[in-house]
């Protein structure tokens, strides 16, 4: 006979998986585009693709993201912009067809370059459409949906590893037809409140520089340590599958050991181990290197996505503007990393190259440590000035002011990340049952979080909570 705790555990996870199972499949379309872009560079399916071709592809993504960021006010919401949608789809399909023709039918460097530029530009627009989707969700849902999407994408990569070249070429042209419809269907399935796109576009003094700088430094290091056209290994897929599964179960477990900062804290050692394993002085195990590198980089990119989406969600910042800047810098810095690696390996001795490699590793460690000790929580502003350039009402009940107040209350009273999530939703006047659905937890769990918050904050009712949230001038005194 099953004892009560075990039965309760089984019932809880059965309920959780029942809720997860009804999440629309289109929400996980990010996995499709990640699997699609790997087709050109990781399976040796396109024999004439070289390192320089990947640089061109990445440059096209970066330039497209920056261009859309600079024109965000005129083109957003991007997901519902028909011209942008048709252009992105045509660019990805046409670009894939041009690459296939140049590699197998009409050998032409010009045709191949045109295909890479088209495909990369279309992908840049698609990435920012998904940024709009994630910016419409609370952080827990961003983490959950993104983890599932990446997991499915890695599973598709695994399937592609056993396919003949002809099938890979077919999917490179066919998959883009599904990508824009997926993000559009995802946005339409959101509630009216969540689907409303923020229009605030700050100036460059309000850009959250710290997460962008951290991602840029790690991307440079990753590009400096690994060539883009290295064949896909089991370790690459296994590393990404491991961390996405970890985030998925961690988010849904409600355990104290897991919160959003756990993603950041685990990304650091995994990435560093994967990066350092490349060094000949330490040793080289390609499978371990691939596993740690992909695990750490995937986890770090997930955390940056959660941070930027949370800034959009809480402060109403235009997702295309914010993510366009981050992605543009990321892809252009990646090119710089590969160019630096090519120059160092060609012109310097092995000893000097190893010294530079060590210096890059040290720079990554210092960047992690600096940002970790200055911006330790998801609720931090991450170097952004939230009110700069805002077009929202600056009254005491504005969404931006309430979000800032929630962050202040969380830090003052030492709320856990889970409790802060509940507090944010309570501040939006959500019911307990609504919060249960939003956070994939039982009512008992939500009520326990509310009880813990009340005790930490020294209040006894929701009315007192609203008074505390809506009156910034009211002093906050943490309980001792």
Image (tube, rainbow, N blue to C red):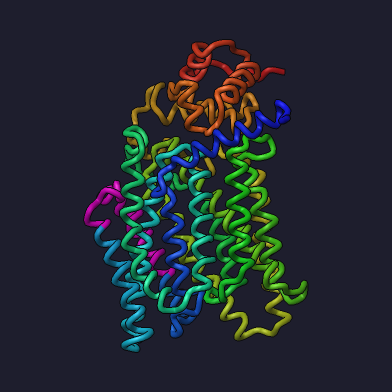
Kindly indicate the quadrant of the structure image that contains residue 134: top left
Q: Is residue 409 above or below residue 216?
A: above
Is the residue 326 above or below the residue 134 in the image? below
Q: Nearer the viewer, residue 23 or 18?
A: 18
State which quarter of the image contains the N terminus.
Answer: top right
Quarter of the figure with residue 133: top left
Residue extending farthest bottom: 107
Q: Is residue 109 left or right of residue 427?
A: left
Q: Residue 260 appears at what percent x and percent y? A: 59, 41
Q: Residue at x 56, y 39 (%)?
A: 378
Say whether residue 214 is visible: no
Q: What's the residue at 68%, 17% (across, down)?
A: 479
Where does the magenta region start and end? 58-85
Please report the residue visible at 35 percent of the width from the left and 34 percent of the height from the top: 191
394 falls in the magenta region: no
Measured as percent of width and height from the top left, residue 441 is found at 55, 30
């Amino acid at each position: 006979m099953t004892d009560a705790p075990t039965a309760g555990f089984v019932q809880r996870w059965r309920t959780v998986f029942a809720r997860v199972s009804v999440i629309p499949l289109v929400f996980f379309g990010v996995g499709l585009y990640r699997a699609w872009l790997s087709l050109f560079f990781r399976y040796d399916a396109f024999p004439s693709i070289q390192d320089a071709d990947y640089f061109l592809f990445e440059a096209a993504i970066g330039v497209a993201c920056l261009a859309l960021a600079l024109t965000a006010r005129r083109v957003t919401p991007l997901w519902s912009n028909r011209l942008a949608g048709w252009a992105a789809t045509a660019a990805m399909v046409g670009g894939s067809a041009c690459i296939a023709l140049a590699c197998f039918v009409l050998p032409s460097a010009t045709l191949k370059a045109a295909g890479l530029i088209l495909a990369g530009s279309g992908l840049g627009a698609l990435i920012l459409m998904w940024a709009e989707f994630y910016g419409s969700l609370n952080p827990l849902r961003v983490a959950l949906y993104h983890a599932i999407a990446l997991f499915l994408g890695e599973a598709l990569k695994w399937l592609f590893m056993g396919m003949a070249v002809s099938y890979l070429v077919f999917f490179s042209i066919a998959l883009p037809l599904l990508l824009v419809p997926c993000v559009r269907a995802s946005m339409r399935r959101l509630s009216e409140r969540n689907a409303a796109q923020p229009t605030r576009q700050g100036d460059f003094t309000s850009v959250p520089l710290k997460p962008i700088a951290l991602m840029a430094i790690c991307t440079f290091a990753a590009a400096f340590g690994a060539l883009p056209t290295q064949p896909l290994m089991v370790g690459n897929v296994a590393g990404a599958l491991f961390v996405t599964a970890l985030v998925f179960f961690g988010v849904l477990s409600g355990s104290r050991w897991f919160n959003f900062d756990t993603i950041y804290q685990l990304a650091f050692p995994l990435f560093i181990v994967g990066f350092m394993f490349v060094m000949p002085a330490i040793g080289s195990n390609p499978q371990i290197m691939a596993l740690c590198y992909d695990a750490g980089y995937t986890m770090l990119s997930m955390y940056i996505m959660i941070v930027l989406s949370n800034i959009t969600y809480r402060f109403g910042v235009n997702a295309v503007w914010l993510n366009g800047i981050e992605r543009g810098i990321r892809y252009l810095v990646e090119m710089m990393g590969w160019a630096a690696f090519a120059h160092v390996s060609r012109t310097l001795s092995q000893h000097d190259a190893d010294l530079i490699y060590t210096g890059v590793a040290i720079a990554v460690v210092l960047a992690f440590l600096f940002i970790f000790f200055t911006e330790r929580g998801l609720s931090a502003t991450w170097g952004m000035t939230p009110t700069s350039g805002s077009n929202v009402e600056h009254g005491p009940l504005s969404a931006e002011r309430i979000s800032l107040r929630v962050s202040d209350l969380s830090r003052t009273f030492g709320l856990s990340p889970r409790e802060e999530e509940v507090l944010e939703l309570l501040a939006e006047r959500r019911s307990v049952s609504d919060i249960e659905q939003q956070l994939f937890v039982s009512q008992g769990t939500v009520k326990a979080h509310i009880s813990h918050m009340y005790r930490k904050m020294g209040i006894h009712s929701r009315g007192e909570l609203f008074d505390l949230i809506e009156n910034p001038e009211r002093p906050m005194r943490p309980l001792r």
